[in-house]
Amino acid sequence: MKELKGCGMRSSVGFLSRRELSGQPLMKEEFQRRRLAGCTRLYKKDMLGHFGCVNAIEFSNNGGEWLVSGGDDRRVLLWHMEKAIHARSKPVKLKGEHLSNIFCLAFDSTNKKVFSGGKSKENPSDLCNKTSFSSYLSVSPVNDNVFASSSDDGRVLIWDTREPPHGEPFCLASYPSAFHSVMFNPVEPRLLATANSKEGVGLWDIRKPRSSLLRYGGSMSLQSAMSVRFNSTGTQLLALRRRLPPVLYELHSRLPSFQFDNQGYFNSCTMKSCCFAGDKDQVGHRCQAFNPFSTPENR
């Protein structure tokens, strides 16, 4: 069918017309991808609800219908994105309150539980309990009762919410330097990636604790790292390093596949995070100038 002028996949009218005629199941993702690629400015909406700095946000799985946020006011707020954008509802304050600032959040696979972590001496769990000093949380992709936490005390711990409240977690890694990030491989849940302030980016097998399988970076493996993420297929890792560009690794290769350098990018002091974005070919990260970057991965 000949495409009508002005009704391409970047316009809402074109998208609705195509969907009605073809009914392709992946058309929504294609529409969103083209809109993002072609836009000159992004829509912005201020969502007000916290009483202090917001340190962590997390979208729900399977479409991002919900958003949780946490910060210096020690509260976790739950937002319904569509209603919040159109100012039709206020966020819901989840029960329970931390003893100190909140720095990380995570949904389980069903979006029925929210895990949170911050700077306190409490045990990590869902919001019915509280969290220990954790810099990042990652829920197992195959078991919503199991999650990993990384912390500034140099440990990566594996927790099971079915254990007694005072039970000891499983220690996967223990270093003198701080772990800033941890993530389960979404396809191979026995594998986890970590970012350490001195040891850099590492790959771990839950069956072989206390010893990493791989340290990424080649001859410069001891690079300060603050964030690491798997892609959706578990075949690549994206990492943020201090005073160096974001870097992409293939799962089983120590050497970088690509470095995302940019003239305006600088990362030295404050903690930041990164993620894969889009269908499969973009990455997102922040820099010292407080600007977000979205970079095509298909170099």
Image (spheres, grey):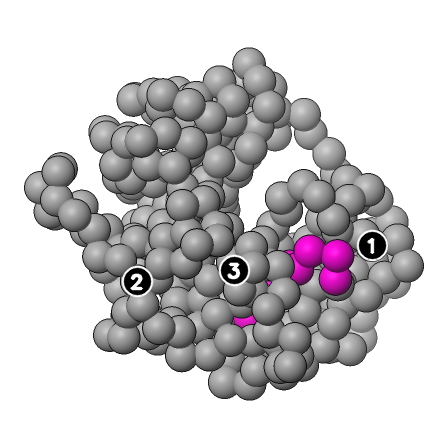
Circle nearer the N terminus (2, 3): 2
Q: Is residue 238 magenta?
A: yes
Circle nearer the N terminus (3, 1): 3
Report the amino acid beneath label 3.
Answer: Ala
Q: Residue furthest right?
A: 263
Circle nearer the N terminus (1, 2): 2
Report the amino acid beneath label 2.
Answer: Leu
**Quadrant in the picture for the N terminus:** bottom right
Determine the secondary structure under disc 3: strand
Identify the residue shown where x is 42% and y is 23%: 100
Q: Is residue 273 magenta?
A: no
Identify the residue shown where x is 63% and y is 46%: 272
* Nearest to the observer: residue 296 or residue 17: 296
Which label lies toward us, 3 or 1? 3
Give me the disc on residue 172. 2
Identify the residue shown where x is 43% and y is 54%: 176
* Nearest to the observer: residue 234 or residue 1: 234
Q: Which residue is tagged 3?
A: 195
Report the amino acid beneath label 1.
Answer: Tyr
Q: Residue furthest top?
A: 51
Q: Measure the C-alpha gap from mark 2 to mark 3.
A: 13 Å
Magenta span: predominant SS is strand
* Nearest to the observer: residue 248 or residue 172: 172
Residue 252 relative to residue 1: left or right: left
Determine the secondary structure under disc 2: strand
Residue 275 relative to residue 103: left or right: right
Residue 19 is situated, as x and y percent measured from the top left of the image, at 60, 62
**Quadrant in the picture for the C terminus:** bottom right
Residue 2 is situated, as x and y percent measured from the top left of the image, at 80, 75
Residue range (magenta):
237-244
Q: Which residue is tagged 1?
A: 265
Q: Circle 2: is it few (<14), some (14-19), or many (20+) Cα within 10 Å?
A: many
